[in-house]
Image: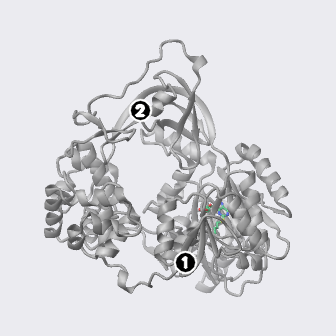
């Protein structure tokens, strides 16, 4: 056979195999027996081996190719991948509908879809060829996981026509594959995955594509990112168009003309959800018409034209076998219930948070009790209540210890706190947790330093303080379990790179009490260098407008500690950057955002107390009043806003949610 004959045959085989693939993995209705498919694939492999020049990336033989990667490359999304607002009950769905109808003049139709519980991904096709797949990441920047996504058989490597389009969807692990995988893990004495979502995410974040290839992942595409010359005018048309291109969409979507239809759909799936072969955690409701979507627009984080109805927390009954204590970064001693493993919302639960001693007393939780536990989404399971009539007298009451379970120092209750605390600054548990926080994503963001590695570093006495991290020795690290030369080198360069972080990351990482990422940012922006911040006294700190008394006091006290001063000096000597690298305060717009505006605040905000929000508005030139009238310029509504919201809507007063408020402050 000559080259051109081979080319022709190869193309014919690929086409045939693509059709079989689509029938099998997307439509779930194969037209040929497996043996026939295997035969064709074998023929193709043989031909490509004989004519290696003819191998192309979109060939069905190339799904699992290449060597493991060193690291994932970061990719900037062309259009941000936003998340969705939530509705937790019927009333909140009706609120959503009301807001949508207020924002559009024409009648609205909704598309309801299942909310697949997996990992959000973006797939980019150029001229019909799959060229890049990425994770959502923080919405702006994700990671290039193309090689892993190529192993998912339901992702076409080539579309049915030569479209250039970016589509979005959820990669997931079907329940059956998940059970099978965990079974295998157990047999190999490995830690099983907690739920299919973690298993899917874990598989797609493996650097070796061969692992993802073995994991039997699947995908449903639910949306479009960038699409030049888009021919469609409604979301439902987009779904149909994606089907035509050979992209796998979820077949259960439905067009609804009214919110009552939406509610019926939601209720129906609440009951039928256990019968699906994949996990869903809710229903997504989207305005169908794309022009209406555009009119409604977005808040900082999510579209106003869509919402996610979250299924209620699921409950289960199990036995509480023991109570374990752990010491956190700030010395708080937290009790955790150990449970007989039980399935809730598709995952096996073995532990539940008990928060503090008061809660144990209040709910009269005893070791040996039969309890109801509750789990919702990512939230740590909780003990709802004890089934007292199941007691047989053998249950034991639990008292918190008087001494720290890790370092044996006396525990104290500070001020009016409910939590018991170990105040020994050298308590090993606190130092360990402090380091875990220091390296975490929003702090110094040091990749490769997970909890297990830190626990080992501690055990081997290689680190004690934050500064020790910057003095780690390559040879010592090589002696640790599961640390090959490559991981050690990656880790050392991640640690080295972290020295260049802007000041706010270091400030947050230090773990100063009450200083979260937001306060750290404000401090870095205001004082610009560590030196200036360390010189600031309480009065200067409290003068910052989103700085509460508690935070200001805590910061002032922190930098009075000789040990802290020593630590900062040492970090400086080790080469850590101590300056703010972001946009300077002086370069930002002046505080006239709300100049001469009359503003009403209502509802509860996540990030600000009412008085903080008031302070911010006033500092930006606005006047805050208590009730909505025709003189009101703006209503800023947090969660659970009540009659003021309705009144403002009635009067046509502009209404912002917390996201919009935050966004306005940041621009
Ligand atoms: S639409 C602009 N539709 O749910 C937001 N999301 O917060 C577009 N998800 O992580 C999202 N199933 O990956 C949409 N049918 C569906 C979905 C869905 C699952 C995920 C999504 C994101 C989260 C939304």
Residue 553 % position (x, y): 29, 57
Q: Does 572 sit above or below residue 29?
A: below
Query: Is residue 482 placed above or below 623 in the rendered structure?
Result: above
**Badge 1: residue crowd in 10 Å (few <14, some 14–19, many ≥20):** some
Q: Quadrant of residue 523?
A: bottom left
Residue 107 percent across, percent down from the top left: 85, 72
Q: Position of residue 94 (x, y in %)?
A: 77, 58
Kindly identify which residue carries mark 1. Answer: 55
- Residue 358 appears in which quarter of the rendering? top left
To which residue does mark 2 refer?
357
Q: Please name the residue shown 58% across and 49% down the image.
A: 377
Local SS, label 1: loop
Which quadrant, please, contains the N terminus?
A: bottom right
Dot 2: few (<14), some (14–19), or many (≥20) neighbours within 10 Å? Answer: some
User: Taking the image as four quarters, which one is ligand 1 found in?
Assistant: bottom right
Tell us which disc is closer to us: 2 or 1.
2
Disc 2 secondary structure class? helix
Can you name the residue that lies furthest to the top here? 393
Q: Nearer the viewer, residue 70 or 646?
A: 646
Q: Is residue 607 visible?
A: no
Whole-number angstrom distance, CA of label 2 to CA of label 1: 65 Å
């Amino acid at each position: 056979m000559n080259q051109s004959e081979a080319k022709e045959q190869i193309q014919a085989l690929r086409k045939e195999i693509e059709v079989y693939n689509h029938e099998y993995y997307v439509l779930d209705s194969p037209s040929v027996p497996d043996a026939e498919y295997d035969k064709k694939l074998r023929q193709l492999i043989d031909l490509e081996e004989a004519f290696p020049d003819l191998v192309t990336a979109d060939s069905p033989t190339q799904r699992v190719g290449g060597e493991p990667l060193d690291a994932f490359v970061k990719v900037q999304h062309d259009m941000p991948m936003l998340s969705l607002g939530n509705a937790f009950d019927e009333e909140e769905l009706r609120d959503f509908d009301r807001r949508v109808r207020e924002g559009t003049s024409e009648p609205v139709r909704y598309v309801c879809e299942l909310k697949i519980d997996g990992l959000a991904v973006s797939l980019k096709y150029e001229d019909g060829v799959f060229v890049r797949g990425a994770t959502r990441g923080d919405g702006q920047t994700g990671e290039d996981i193309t090689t892993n996504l190529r192993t998912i058989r339901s992702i076409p490597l080539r579309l049915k026509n030569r479209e250039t389009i970016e589509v979005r969807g959820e990669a997931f692990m079907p329940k059956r594959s998940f059970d099978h995988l965990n079974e295998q893990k157990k047999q190999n004495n490995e830690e099983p995955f907690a739920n299919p979502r973690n298993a899917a995410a874990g598989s797609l974040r493996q650097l070796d594509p061969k692992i993802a290839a073995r994991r039997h992942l699947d995908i449903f595409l639910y949306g479009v990112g960038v699409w030049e010359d888009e021919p469609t005018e409604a979301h439902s048309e987009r779904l149909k168009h994606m089907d035509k291109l050979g992209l796998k969409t979820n077949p259960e979507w439905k067009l609804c003309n009214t919110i009552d239809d939406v509610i019926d759909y939601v209720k129906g799936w609440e009951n039928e959800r256990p019968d699906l072969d994949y996990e869903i955690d809710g229903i997504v409701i989207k305005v169908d018409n794309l022009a209406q979507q555009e009119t409604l627009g977005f808040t900082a984080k999510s579209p106003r034209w869509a919402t996610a109805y979250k299924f209620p927390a699921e409950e289960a009954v199990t036995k509480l076998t023991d109570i374990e204590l752990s010491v956190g970064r700030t010395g708080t001693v937290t009790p955790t219930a150990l449970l007989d493993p039980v399935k809730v919302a598709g995952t096996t639960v073995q532990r539940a948070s008990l928060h503090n001693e008061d809660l144990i007393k209040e709910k009269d939780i005893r070791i040996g009790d039969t309890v109801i536990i509750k789990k919702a989404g990512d939230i740590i399971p909780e003990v709802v209540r004890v089934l007292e009539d199941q007691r047989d007298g053998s249950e034991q009451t639990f008292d918190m210890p008087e001494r720290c379970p890790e370092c044996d120092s006396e525990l104290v209750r500070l001020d009016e706190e409910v939590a018991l605390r170990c105040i020994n600054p050298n308590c090993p548990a606190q130092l360990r947790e402090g380091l875990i926080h220091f390296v975490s994503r929003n702090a110094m963001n040091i990749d490769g330093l997970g909890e297990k590695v830190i626990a080992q570093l501690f055990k081997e006495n290689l680190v004690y303080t934050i500064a020790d991290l910057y003095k780690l020795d390559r040879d010592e690290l090589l002696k640790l379990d599961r640390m090959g030369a490559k991981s050690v080198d990656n880790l050392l360069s991640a640690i080295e790179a972290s020295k260049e972080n802007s000041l706010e990351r270091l400030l947050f990482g230090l773990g100063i009490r009450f200083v979260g990422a937001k306060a750290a940012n404000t401090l870095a922006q205001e004082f610009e260098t560590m030196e200036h911040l360390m010189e600031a006294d309480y009065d200067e700190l409290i003068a910052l407008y989103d700085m509460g008394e508690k935070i200001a006091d805590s910061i002032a006290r922190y930098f009075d500690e000789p040990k802290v001063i020593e630590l900062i000096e040492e970090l400086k000597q080790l080469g850590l950057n101590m300056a703010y690298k972001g946009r300077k305060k002086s370069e930002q717009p002046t505080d006239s955002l709300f100049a001469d505006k009359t503003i009403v605040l209502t509802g509860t905000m996540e990030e600000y107390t009412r008085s903080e929000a008031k302070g911010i508005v006033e500092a930006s030139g606005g006047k805050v009043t208590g009730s909505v009238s025709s003189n009101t310029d703006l209503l800023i509504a947090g969660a659970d806003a009540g009659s003021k919201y309705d009144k403002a809507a009635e009067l046509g007063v502009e209404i912002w949610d917390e996201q919009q408020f935050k966004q306005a402050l940041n621009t």
